[in-house]
């Protein structure tokens, strides 16, 4: 039984990010097979195989079923591997797929679904780190995801995935956050034996591709940027920061209420 990692990179900027992520992976997981799906030229030596991006609704969704591995870890290009994977792939001895919850769960963006009316306690899942095995059930799920993505008409594939996981009988496991570390500032709160940070996944690694922003290349740079951004967001919402002594639970409840009110006003404006 084979296992390995795949990346999907459309464009030179994403190819460069995939190469950096793959180097971090190979340094800590020697011998791991790593493939790339891309429309770019790639220097030999880093990836075991390089494939063209197949036709489909998105490069990522089209590539997932083209993996040559029995057990596959898909990684977005804006990731860095921080520790050996250890027994991560053993999850697939029992489950068809493993994926982590998304962050920012009280926002309208992350609560969005297409067909289903879903409870808050069943949030969107972040598909930038996804472990899955080759099986009839999994391939049917991935094909259904493509179909639902087209129907939903959203740019983000998490919306259709959100609906599909709720409606499906697929056996999946929820990965702990250290395997899809979206908030580096969590490291500030964890005690020494709370977790083993393994995969960093941060949009700040690609922020230079989205506008006039500096390129960040490592965890500590991102950690500093996140601390600043976190404090600025509390100020922007006009709320007292719990890190500065404000009561934590009321602060988060007020933030959610403001988000809900803003969404409601946006809907009313759209209807006028």
Image (tube, rainbow, N blue to C red):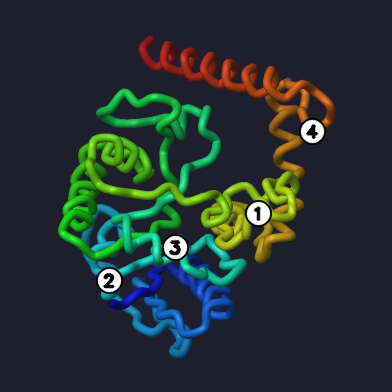
Of all residues, the one furthest to the bottom in this rendering is: 45
In space, the residues marked 1 and 3 are separated at their CA atoms by 23 Å
Q: Marks 3 and 2, Cα distance to the nearest angstrom?
A: 16 Å
Instruction: Name the one closer to the observer, 137 or 26.
Output: 137
For image coordinates 39% across by 17% down, the residue present is 270
Determine whether label 4 and label 1 are within 8 Å by CB: no
Which residue was labeled with disc 3?
75
Give me the C-alpha separation between circle 1 and circle 2. Answer: 39 Å
Residues marked 4 and 3 touching at CB (< 8 Å) = no
Question: In front: 135, or 19?
Answer: 135
Comes first in the chain, label 3 or label 2: 2
Mark pair 2, 4: CA separation = 45 Å
Identify which residue is drawn at 19% across, 47% down: 144
Q: Earlier in the sequence, mark 4 or mark 3?
A: 3
Mark 2 secondary-structure assignment: loop
Give residue 248's quadrant in the image: top right
x, y percent for residue 62: 25, 60
Q: Nearer the viewer, mark 3 or mark 2?
A: 2
Q: Residue sitting at 45 percent across and 80 percent down?
A: 32
Residue bearing the label numbered 2: 70
Q: Mark 1: which secondary structure?
A: loop
* Crowd tier of the residue under label 2, counting other residues whose Cα lies within 10 Å: few below 14, some 14–19, many 20 or above: some
For the residue labelled by badge 3, is the local secondary structure a helix, a strand or a loop?
strand
Quadrant of the image for the N terminus? bottom left
Residue located at (71% from left, 48% from top): 190
Residue 243: mark in rendering? 4
Camera-nearest label, 1 or 2: 2
Cα distance between the residues tagged 4 and 1: 26 Å
Is the C-beta separation of discs 2 and 4 under 8 Å? Answer: no
């Amino acid at each position: 039984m084979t296992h390995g990692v795949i990346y999907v990179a459309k464009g030179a900027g994403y190819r460069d990010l995939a190469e950096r992520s793959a180097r971090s992976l190979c340094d800590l997981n020697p011998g791991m097979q790593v493939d790339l799906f891309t429309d770019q030229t790639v220097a030999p030596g880093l990836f075991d195989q390089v494939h063209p991006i197949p036709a489909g609704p998105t490069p990522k969704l089209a590539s997932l079923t083209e993996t040559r591995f029995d057990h596959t870890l898909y990684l977005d290009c804006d990731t860095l591997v921080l520790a050996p994977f250890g027994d991560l792939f053993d999850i697939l001895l029992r489950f068809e797929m493993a994926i982590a919850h998304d962050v920012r769960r009280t926002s309208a963006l992350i609560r969005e679904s297409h067909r289903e009316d879903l409870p808050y306690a069943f949030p969107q899942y972040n598909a930038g780190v996804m472990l899955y095995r080759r099986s009839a059930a999994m391939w049917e799920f991935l094909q259904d995801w493509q179909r639902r993505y087209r129907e939903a008409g959203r740019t983000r594939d998490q919306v259709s995935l959100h609906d599909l996981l709720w409606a499906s009988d697929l056996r999946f496991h929820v990965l702990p956050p250290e395997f899809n570390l979206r908030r580096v500032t969590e490291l500030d709160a964890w005690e020494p034996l709370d977790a083993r940070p393994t995969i960093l996944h941060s949009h700040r690694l690609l922020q230079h591709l989205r506008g006039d922003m500096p390129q960040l290349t490592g965890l500590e740079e991102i950690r500093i940027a996140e601390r600043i951004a976190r404090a600025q967001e509390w100020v922007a919402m006009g709320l007292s920061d719990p890190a500065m002594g404000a009561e934590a639970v009321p602060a988060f409840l007020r933030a959610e209420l403001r988000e809900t009110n803003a969404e409601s006003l946006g809907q009313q404006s759209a209807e006028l």
